[in-house]
Image (tube, rainbow, N blue to C red):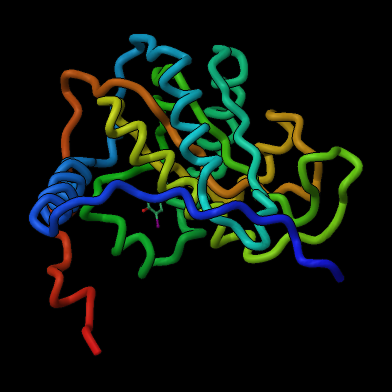
Amino acid sequence: MPDPEAFPWQPYPELADAERIARARAFADALRTRRSCRAFREDPVPREVIEAALAAAGTAPSGANRQPWHFAVVSSPEAKCAIRIAAEEEERAFYDGRAGSEWLEALWPLGTGADKPYLETAPWLIVVFAQRRGGPDPDDLKQNYYVTESVGLACGLLLATLHEAGVASLVHTPNPMRFLNRVCRRPDHEKPVMVIVAGYPADDATIPAHALEKKSLEQIASWL
Ligand code: IYR
């Protein structure tokens, strides 16, 4: 095979170490203030913010650069209502026993329950689909690689961009969530992964104390 086409590296900015450290810390400090929000106002968030967050997600590294993600962006009251009804049905079964006692115990400090009014009040629901197959061309049904990892990376960048824009978010994972294919009209080979709820926090939004407990650097890292 011939060598693939390649371009010279585009240099990153030359910075003094002190400036690098300051920038890295400032970015980490900004991310540290992100919280999962479970009560939203109805106020609109500009579509351009969502577009920019999706553009950021689209820059994520992915297996063989196959970009195995699709984001179904939901704002219509009808579609939001359909998602809420189906999600709450699954959540009721989940909280009424399907989860099992260990899972419910783990969730207790977050104060979550089967009612999900935010699925209708928040202005945007971004339904994330993982594409086991398929590329940019609709006829491309070739295999994708590291799909879960790639989609997770894209979603992280999306959440960080929403936060940078001052927009609150929640990763919502109804279980099971196959109904999202129907509501969002996505093909069967796409697997719904999560719903990212985006909007402004309600005046009475709260932060569970448990959510503020983050592991220390010593707990999450080892240096070899
Ligand atoms: N999908 C449910 C349950 C839930 C599960 C986990 I793991 C969470 O971190 C939060 C909630 C719900 O949305 O309530």
Left or right of 53, for residue 203:
left
When the figure is inspected, residue 218 is found, relative to residue 188, above or below; the finding is below
Residue found at x 36% / y 70%: 102
Farthest residue in the right direction? 139
Residue found at x 59% / y 57%: 62
Quarter holding residue 202: top left
Q: In which quarter of the image is the N terminus?
A: bottom right
Q: In which quarter of the image is the C terminus?
A: bottom left
Farthest residue in the top direction? 43
Left or right of 85, for residue 183:
right
Residue found at x 47% / y 15%: 47
Report the number of numbered marks: 0
Using the image as rendered, state which of residue 96 and residue 163 is in the foreground.
163
Farthest residue in the front direction? 8
Horizontal and vertical percent for residue 27?
Answer: 20, 45
Using the image as rendered, state which of residue 202 and residue 100 is in the foreground.
202
Horizontal and vertical percent for residue 46?
Answer: 41, 12
Residue found at x 22% / y 77%: 221
Left or right of 14, for residue 158:
right
Quarter holding residue 77: top right
Horizontal and vertical percent for residue 222?
Answer: 22, 83
Horizontal and vertical percent for residue 80?
Answer: 55, 21
Left or right of 138, for residue 211:
left
